[in-house]
Image: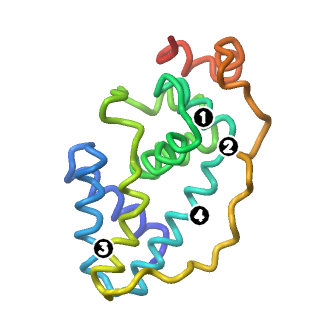
Amino acid sequence: MDETEFWELIDTARRGAEGDPEDQADLLVERLCRLDPEAVLDFARHFEVRYQRASTWELWGAAWILLGGASDDAFDCFRCWLIGQGREVYEGAVHDADALADLLDDFDEEVDGDGEDLGYAADEAYEQLTGVVAPDLDIPPPPAEPVGTPIDLENDRALAERLPRLWERFGD
């Protein structure tokens, strides 16, 4: 599976779910189950690499602003949701987290920002196809801390300075 196929699966599931992350995960599992197990593992590798790449202080700050606070677990779920938004939003945000102010049409913290189920879609599909748990993906472990210069997430001024457009649009 190449990168284009990966993003097509993400996008078709998102469109089919009309933006609901839980429905998107269900549709993604359904579509992945139409593939062979090795293609599902390829999808999982693509997902994991992007998940790790999104572990930056700026994106944690963005999650904090959008969600009104974000524990490390909430940030993990946010990164899965971010991947689920598709290539344009994901790449734009990884390049410049503050760009989410322009990339997101709206944000409802009751529905948006939590894509935990998306993070398990490949594992679930693999298990449905094979009856066994997915093997290790042979991807180096992620860094212990997010990449970049740390942000004091509980300091509104620090967040507003680092992510001014996002703060202006979605901050408290």
Q: CA distance from mark 1 to mark 4?
A: 18 Å
User: What's the residue at 74%, 56% (across, down)?
Assistant: 143
Give the mark nearer the N terminus: 3 vs 1. 3
Query: Which label sits on residue 56?
Result: 2
Query: Which label sits on residue 97?
Result: 1
Q: CA distance from mark 3 to mark 1?
A: 29 Å
Q: Residues within 10 Å of mark 4 (few under 14, many from 20)?
A: some
Q: Looking at numbered disc 4 in the image, what kind of residue is underneath it?
A: Val
Left or right of 109 in this view: 31: left
Give how far across and how far down residue 164 sits, in percent. Answer: 62, 17
Check the image and name the residue furthest to the right. 149
Give how far across and how far down residue 41 sits, in percent. Answer: 46, 79
Give how far across and how far down residue 128 sits, in percent. Answer: 28, 80
Tell me whether circle 4 and circle 2 mark residues in contact (CB < 8 Å). Answer: no
Q: Nearer the observer, disc 3 or disc 1?
A: 3
Q: Is residue 1 above or below residue 55?
A: below
Q: Looking at numbered disc 2 in the image, what kind of residue is underneath it?
A: Thr
Left or right of 19 in this view: 87: right
User: What's the residue at 74%, 48% (across, down)?
Assistant: 145
Q: Looking at numbered disc 3 in the image, what kind of residue is underneath it?
A: Leu
Q: Secondary structure at mark 4?
A: helix
Give the mark nearer the N terminus: 4 vs 2. 4
Which residue is denoted by mark 4 in the rendering? 49
Give the mark nearer the N terminus: 2 vs 3. 3
Tell me whether circle 2 and circle 1 mark residues in contact (CB < 8 Å). Answer: yes
Query: Which label sits on residue 32?
Result: 3
Q: CA distance from mark 2 to mark 3?
A: 28 Å
Q: Is residue 141 above or below residue 73?
A: below
